[in-house]
Image: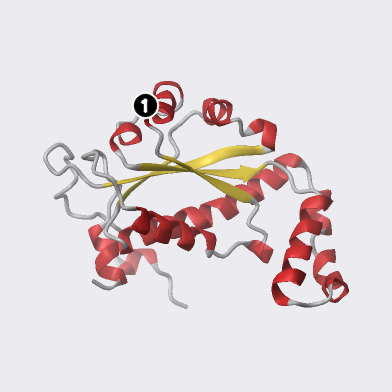
Amino acid sequence: MNLIEKLNWRYATKRMNGTKVSQEKVDKILEAVRLAPTSYGLQPFKVIVIENKELLEKIFNEACQQPQIKEGSHLLVFAAKKNIDAEQVDEYIQLIADTRGIKIESLSDFKAMFGGVIAGSEDKNFVWTARQAYIAFGIGIVAAAMEDVDATPMEGFSAEAMDKILGLSEEGFSAVNVLALGYRDEKNDYLSKATKVRKSKESLFDFR
């Protein structure tokens, strides 16, 4: 199927049947997330990939009581960096230089563009880093559909509890969204056969 057919096929799966997603498919989804565009290419977030059943049970009980947490195969937790500092920017500039085989001095103008980010407040920076995580989050949803893997994007969880369970605060991160991967349980998911509801092209797009 092509992209549009895959997007029509996918939906926010409400119940999953517990079937394991192959490592090959998971790896492709994760690679798509890794390749997602972000502002400056900085990728100011990380993704925690969870399949440990005891940990998923703990997350279900303390942070997100949605059945997909336990019924799914893998849970991807997208955690954004709370703040951006000069050290992180220096590491990124070094990575660019190493990857492209160029002198770090040639990146001085690009590095200067991060001045406003570094000077920003933690609250302002976290809003920005969370937006970057959302871009990768969306790419992950599409990638899952392309692999015929169901995915449930979720925001309805306790970030405070999730951060505590995964030790994210100590690392300077906070969870912003989660994506459950698995396969739909057509017998118990009332939306598995439902027609997709979206605005018409005429009402959504404003051509000028």
Q: Residues within 10 Å of mark 1 (few under 14, many from 20)?
A: some
- Say above or below: 148 vs 74: below
Is residue 21 rendered to the left or right of residue 128? left
In which image quadrant can residue 138 be found? bottom left
Total marks placed: 1
Q: Measuring 84% from the left and 50% from the top, which residue is drawn there?
A: 119
Helix, strand or loop for disc 1: loop
Question: The disc labelled 1 sits on which kind of residue?
Answer: Gln
- Say above or below: 113 vs 184: below
Is residue 177 rendered to the left or right of residue 122? left
Please provide percent x and percent y for residue 39: 65, 62
Q: Measuring 29% from the left and 46% from the top, which residue is drawn there?
A: 182
Is residue 205 rendered to the left or right of residue 168? left
In which image quadrant can residue 94 be found? bottom right
Asked whether residue 100 appears in the rendered view, the answer is yes
Asked whether residue 199 appears in the rendered view, the answer is no
Q: Quadrant of the N terminus?
A: bottom left
Render colour scheme: secondary structure
Q: Measuring 64% from the left and 46% from the top, which residue is drawn there?
A: 127
Please provide percent x and percent y for residue 141: 39, 55
Along the line of sight, the residue nearer the viewer: 132 or 23: 23
Is residue 22 rendered to the left or right of residue 44? left
Q: Spot the residue most to the front.
A: 23
Q: Which residue is mark 1?
A: 65
Please provide percent x and percent y for residue 51: 40, 39
Q: Spot the residue most to the left.
A: 187
Along the line of sight, the residue nearer the viewer: 41 or 11: 41
Along the line of sight, the residue nearer the viewer: 61 or 101: 101
In which image quadrant can residue 4 be found? bottom left
